[in-house]
Amino acid sequence: MGILILLSDFLLNISLRFPKFKWIVAGFTVIYFLIFGGVTFFQATLWQSPYKLMEAASKRYPNTPIILNTIATEAIKKGDYQKALSLLDTAIRINPEFIAAFYNRGIVKDRLQDFDNALKDFTVCINNNPYYTEAYFGRGNIFRQMGNTDNAIKDFSTVIRLDRKNAGAWNNRAIIKGQQGNFCGAIIDLDTAIQLQNDLAPAYYLRGVAKFKIGLNGCDDLHKAVSLNYTNAEKALQFYCGE
């Protein structure tokens, strides 16, 4: 991938300097990418980590926000949040309209418990794209952690309106409804979450507990949560079901 990027830069410079050769250059570029692109990808897959290739490309193109964002994404997966934050700050400084970097920085700031600034980054995403479901979901989680249940409910409800198959949003909205004492409403949301994702362990646990809160038997749900290895499910099963 690094080779492809370097060659494309070389070909672009030629076409700019010698306009009359631009069609020849374009044809050669197409042939190169078709023939050698697959080989380069094959080599990258077998011999090198794409992450390392991207880092190499970033040295050649240090001011490319999309490359910086891609490396930051890998750093987030590895738990290297400070590195990710530095890369994302740079990407946003270069291109203040690069919304994907704002979203990833919101994720990083959430992990670092910098909730106020995480809210700002997710809000930038939403203001730029009112259909950005992931940003609403991320901001909803921040509001929930901050105890702002009303705004959390609003954001998760927006996710559900935009994507009714988002099991996580139904589950998280149920959590807040349970915290507000609305156990019937929580059960309704959890029913939907489980229909959408039948191995969603937290939903079975929460629904089991919510059922007991309104006088119903939730042992079956707690058994299911235990079978899915959900944390605290066994304790809840002992507490509520005596098992």
Image (spheres, rainbow, N blue to C red):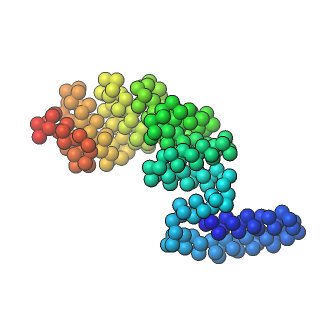
Horizontally, residue 90 falls left or right of residue 191, namely: right
Q: Nearer the viewer, residue 138 or 241?
A: 138
Could you tell me residue 120's position as x and y percent?
A: 56, 32
Q: Nearer the viewer, residue 175 or 66?
A: 66
Could you tell me residue 152's position as x and y percent?
A: 45, 29
Q: Nearer the viewer, residue 212 or 238?
A: 238
- Residue at point 60%, 62% (across, down): 56
Image height check: is 198 above or below 180? below
Could you tell me residue 191's position as x and y percent?
A: 32, 38
Query: Is residue 126 in view?
Result: no
- Residue at point 71%, 68% (across, down): 7
Horizontally, residue 138 falls left or right of residue 86, namely: left
Q: How many marks?
A: 0
Q: Quadrant of the C terminus?
A: top left
Image height check: is 187 above or below 16? above
- Residue at point 24%, 36% (across, down): 208
Query: Is residue 226 in view?
Result: yes
Give the quadrant of residue 179. top left
Could you tell me residue 92's position as x and y percent?
A: 63, 43
Q: Which residue is situated farthest in the left direction here?
A: 242
Q: Quadrant of the N terminus?
A: bottom right
Give the quadrant of residue 222. top left
Image height check: is 107 above or below 51? above
- Residue at point 54%, 63% (across, down): 52
